[in-house]
Amino acid sequence: MLRRIFLSSVMAGALAFAVFWWLTIPAVVSPDLLAAYTPNLANGLTTFNAAGCSSCHAVPGQPDRLKLGGGLAIPSPFGTFYAPNISPDPADGIGRWSEAEFVAAVTKGVSPAGSHYFPAFPYPSYQRAKVDEVRDLFAYLKTLAPVSGKARGHDVPFPFNIRRNVGIWKWLFVDGKPFVPDPTRSARWNRGAYLAGSLGHCAECHSPRNFLGGIIAAQRFAGGPNPEGEGWVPNITQKGLGEWSVSDFAYFFETGQMPDGDSAGGAMARVIKNISQLPADDRAAIADYIKSLPPVDGPPRPKKAAKGGKS
């Protein structure tokens, strides 16, 4: 009897491990699936700015936003991640990557070595990007100056440091679907929805997350605790910014100035440095889309403690 129970347990464990292994196989992009294409470097620059690459990958503490040697610390509830070098350096950056490997990294969150990237890299949004635009981005990055030096390794404790487990996270929160335009909306609105929902990855910061770190779909864009650990990210639906006009949003994206005279700070200041470089039509499109977001209640914001330590 005990032998039978033992064998059943072993078989159940082996089956569970096999299912886990199958569910967590990293996806790849075969070069054969990429049709012949001549990259558009001008659009590669637009894609670079829309995706905010320099916000995370520029070397901290230096003024050149095109020196993409990485190193920025990205705190999270699961540990601290460090943005990697994505300059064209052949040893420390992406200089030896193939185009297919880059597309797999951006849209599927898989490294050239075939392992999962942690979702501090916002591929849950980047998966919506058009493949040809990702190819344009890769071509543009290769025109930049190589930067030597690798970023330090992530400080992520067990069990979150096991990359294979990210495959389960992807199974739960990454659906692999591209952006689909809404035929009932204008071309400008759809452009804004595409930029904000894919390359711009606005929801990655402006949405509350569950205990696994996945965005709570019902509260998308409704703000919440700063995933980097300090402060509060605002609700950008009409519940939070209902008094802002489309022109207010567009002006904010260009200058970082809010209607009340305040200005963007923290991580958003880095975002503005990128989004302000977009063509005016693209900033207006994003503004049109954000203004259209229906009001959604976000999580309750903690009350500030009164002076003197009294609540």
Image: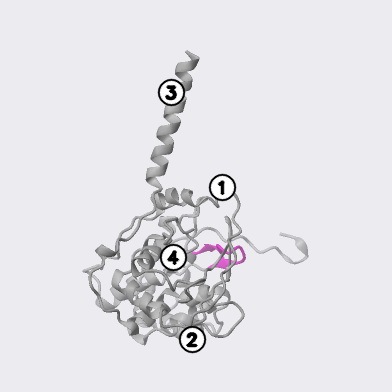
Q: Earlier in the sequence, mark 4 or mark 1?
A: 1
Inspect the image, locate mark 4, and give the three-letter code of the amino acid beneath it: Ala
Which residue corresponds to mark 1?
159
At label 2, counting other C-alpha atoms closer than 10 Å, the crowd grade (few under 14, some 14-19, many 20 or more) is some
Q: Nearer the viewer, mark 4 or mark 1?
A: 1
Q: Position of residue 77 (x, y in %)?
A: 58, 56
Q: Is residue 236 left or right of residue 47?
A: right
Inspect the image, locate mark 2, and give the three-letter code of the amino acid beneath it: Thr
Residue depicted at 40% across the width and 69% down the height: 97
Q: Earlier in the sequence, mark 4 or mark 3?
A: 3
Dot 3 falls on a residue whose secondary structure is helix
Q: Earlier in the sequence, mark 1 or mark 3?
A: 3
Q: Earlier in the sequence, mark 2 or mark 4?
A: 4
Badges 4 and 1: C-beta atoms under 8 Å apart? no
Which residue corresponds to mark 4?
203
Q: CA distance from mark 4 to mark 3?
A: 45 Å
Which residue corresponds to mark 2?
255
Q: Earlier in the sequence, mark 2 or mark 3?
A: 3
Inspect the image, locate mark 3, and give the three-letter code of the amino acid beneath it: Ser
| Quadrant of residue 50 within the rendered picture | bottom left
Inspect the image, locate mark 1, and give the three-letter code of the amino acid beneath it: Pro
Q: Which residues are magenta?
A: 221-233
Q: CA distance from mark 1 to mark 3?
A: 27 Å
Dot 2 falls on a residue whose secondary structure is helix
Q: Earlier in the sequence, mark 1 or mark 2?
A: 1
Badges 4 and 3: C-beta atoms under 8 Å apart? no
At label 4, counting other C-alpha atoms closer than 10 Å, the crowd grade (few under 14, some 14-19, many 20 or more) is many
Q: CA distance from mark 4 to mark 1?
A: 26 Å
Instruction: Please check the rendered image and state whether residue 133 is part of the magenta-colored stretch, yes or no.
Output: no
